[in-house]
């Protein structure tokens, strides 16, 4: 594991608390849910915000949606320890309400810093909030599973596992989109080789 990257990530997490980001969210939350996984990951998954289980355990995607995410990773021969998982906002919104634009904006610099440190080849956005932060003009129903290159980074918009748990169609689409990850990574690698 890359300890210098991990140290830099720890510092970003400390900065969030020190700079008192979204104090009203922090007040209602048990703890900061910063991110979890390999700081050297090729792929970063970004959800929208922590839920109840995440808030209690301090790790993203540990509830039912997290189990589903783990299962899908297994299907593509990947493990949680190989990827990095985080959310746009790092505190649980009360009653699991949607993150507000001001909250998303407040956390955005820290999320971008996280991405800078990890330098993933692929960013998989889970759900429309996460997608719209990076690809504001797109509709998830139209672009899910299609890699998009923006400012030198490759994004793969996908449905949120939580939504897919209760919607059979979305579940199938999410699993199909997930199955594309290895070939998308391969293609990014091939492109990188040719540009050297």
Image (cartoon, grey):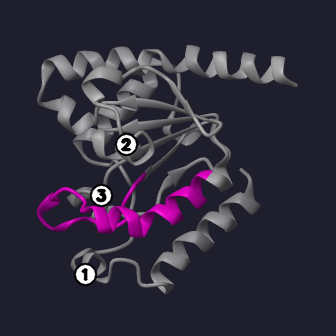
Residue found at the far front of this picture: 137
In magenta stretch: residue 88: yes
Element assignment for label 2: loop
Task: Please tell me which residue is depicted at 49% across the width and 23% down the height of the picture.
Answer: 147
In magenta stretch: residue 106: yes
Q: Which residue is mark 3?
A: 50
N-terminal-most mark, 3 or 1: 1
Looking at the image, residue 35 lies above or below residue 47: below
Q: CA distance from mark 1 to mark 2?
A: 26 Å
In the visual, does 150 lie left or right of 96?
right
Q: Which residue is mark 2?
A: 136
Element assignment for label 3: loop
Mark 2 residue crowding within 10 angstroms, few (<14) / some (14–19) / many (20+): few
Q: Main secondary structure of the magenta part?
A: helix
Q: Position of residue 180 (x, y in %)?
A: 47, 15
Residue found at the far right of this picture: 196
Q: CA distance from mark 3 to mark 1?
A: 15 Å
Mark 3 residue crowding within 10 angstroms, few (<14) / some (14–19) / many (20+): many
Looking at the image, residue 49 lies above or below residue 147: below
Query: Which of label 1 and label 2 is nearer to you?
Result: 2
Q: Which mark is residue 120?
A: none
Q: Which mark is residue 24?
A: 1
């Amino acid at each position: 594991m890359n300890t210098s990257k991990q140290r830099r990530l720890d510092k970003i997490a400390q900065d969030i608390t020190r700079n008192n980001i979204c104090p009203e969210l922090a007040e209602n939350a048990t703890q900061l849910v910063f991110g979890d996984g390999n700081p050297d990951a090729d792929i970063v998954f970004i959800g929208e915000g922590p839920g109840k289980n995440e808030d209690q355990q301090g790790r993203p995607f540990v509830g039912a949606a997290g189990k589903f995410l783990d299962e899908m990773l297994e299907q593509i021969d990947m493990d949680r320890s190989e990827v990095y998982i985080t959310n746009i906002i790092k505190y649980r919104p009360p009653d699991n309400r949607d993150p507000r634009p001001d909250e998303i904006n407040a956390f955005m610099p820290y999320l971008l810093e996280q991405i800078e440190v990890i330098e993933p080849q692929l960013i998989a956005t889970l759900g429309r909030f996460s997608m719209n932060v990076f690809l504001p003009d797109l509709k998830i129903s139209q672009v899910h599973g299609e890699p998009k290159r923006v400012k030198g980074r490759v994004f793969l918009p996908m449905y949120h596992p939580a939504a897919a748990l209760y919607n059979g169609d979305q579940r199938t689409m999410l699993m199909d989109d997930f199955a594309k990850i290895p070939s998308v990574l391969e293609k990014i690698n091939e492109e990188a080789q040719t540009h050297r």
